[in-house]
Image: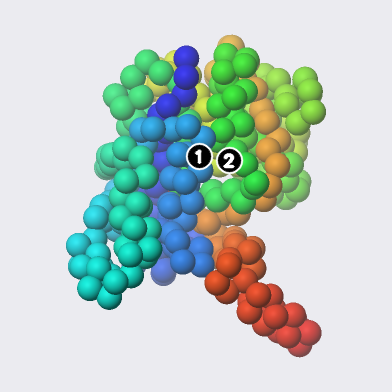
Amino acid sequence: MKVRKAVIPAAGLGTRMLPAAKAVPKEMMPIVDKPVMQYQIEEAVNSGITDILIITNRGKESIEDYFDYSPEYERHLEMKGKTEELEKLRAIANMAKITFLRQKEAKGLGHAVLQAREFVGNEPFAVLYGDDLIEADSPTTKSLIELYERFGKGVAGVKAVSRQQITKYCSLKLEEIEKDVFSCTDMIEKPSPDKIMSLYSILGRVVLPPEIFPIIENLKPGAGGEIQLTDAMCALARDKGMIAYAYPGTHHDMGSKLGLIKANIAFGIKHEEIGEDLKNWLKEFTRGL
Ligand code: UTP
């Protein structure tokens, strides 16, 4: 079955980005001149997704407003004859069929995904973690969808990380099938060093079958007292097997201060308006370090 729906969980508290997260959801922090969420929507749309559900919570109304029309700005741009800017702004609201749903309590990523059950129905769907930005030549979600359609199994986008990092993420038991494509039969969230299965961790993108919902529903709180999506995927991997794909490109963690700054530099030096100036400034600046 074709994958045409995507869920973007963006209802976390973002405590690592406090105090800024009090005013701006981490999923809406700017990367140069666009909020993180726009990059996620662009990736989904460029992957063939037509219907998107964003999971939000209290204080994240700015996400909904962003994907709506903005008559004040539009009128202003129209009066000034700035047609190109006007079209760009309008296009944001028409990128895809976007709907919103609230997770009433931040009970974990698994619980956030469970809110999408009705939206998803009996179809496979993609999950783009709201705070994981991927900088790549081709959309990562598209590659995952292609693998889902080829193997008929849930697919996780993975990256090799350090031993220290893996204890904060999850670790997967993998066997390589072809270059960068693995069969996955087990995984663990936030493993202690003796429980590490491999240094591959799921970073930001998965494509799942609807069978994941009854599994999540029956989960008990896991690491950190949260309903962990990893625990549900672990049950799926043990029972049916999953595919893992070590995707190319750079993963940026928008839930961390360092990640946000690195992403701004990485996207900034490629930006057509400010790229050259930023590069020149960086060269000067780093000389003094
Ligand atoms: P994180 O675990 O990085 O988010 O979840 P967090 O809880 O906001 O992080 P900190 O530790 O407090 O800084 C990854 C993604 O899942 C969403 C987040 O918004 C983020 O995009 N999420 C997480 C939810 O939608 N609901 C939750 O209950 C937890």
Report which residue position mark 1 lands on. Answer: 46
Is residue 157 something that shows in the picture?
yes
Q: Amino acid at mark 2?
A: Pro
Query: From where the camera sits, is residue 14 visible?
Result: no
The quarter holding residue 112 reads top left
Q: Residue 185 appears at what percent x and percent y? A: 67, 19
User: Observer-nearest residue: 237 or 73?
Assistant: 73
Please, what secondary structure does the residue beneath circle 2 have?
A: loop
Is residue 237 or residue 279 the one in the foreground? 279
Determine if the C-beta at disc 1 is less than 8 A from ligand 1. Answer: no
Which label is found at residue 29?
none
- Residue 84 drawn at (x, y percent): 38, 63
The kind of residue on which mark 1 rests is: Asn
Q: On residue 139, which mark appears?
A: 2
In the picture, the quarter occupied by the C terminus is bottom right
**What is the secondary structure assignment of the residue under circle 1?**
loop
* Neighbourhood count class around disc 2 (C-alpha, 10 Å): few under 14, some 14–19, many 20 upward: many
Residue 25 placement (x, y as % from top left): 38, 59
Q: CA distance from mark 2 to mark 1?
A: 7 Å
Classify 27 as above or below 193.
below
What residue lies at 32% left-to-right and 46% top-to-bottom? Answer: 94
Q: Position of residue 283 (x, y in %)?
A: 74, 80
Q: Quadrant of residue 121?
A: top left
Which residue is at 24% across, 55% downward?
Answer: 69
User: Mark 2 or mark 1: which comes first in sequence?
Assistant: 1
From the viewer's side, name the closer residue of 29 and 39. Answer: 39
Contact (CB < 8 A) between labels 2 and 1?
yes
Residue located 62% across and 16% down the image: 150
Could you tell me how many numbered marks the image carries? 2
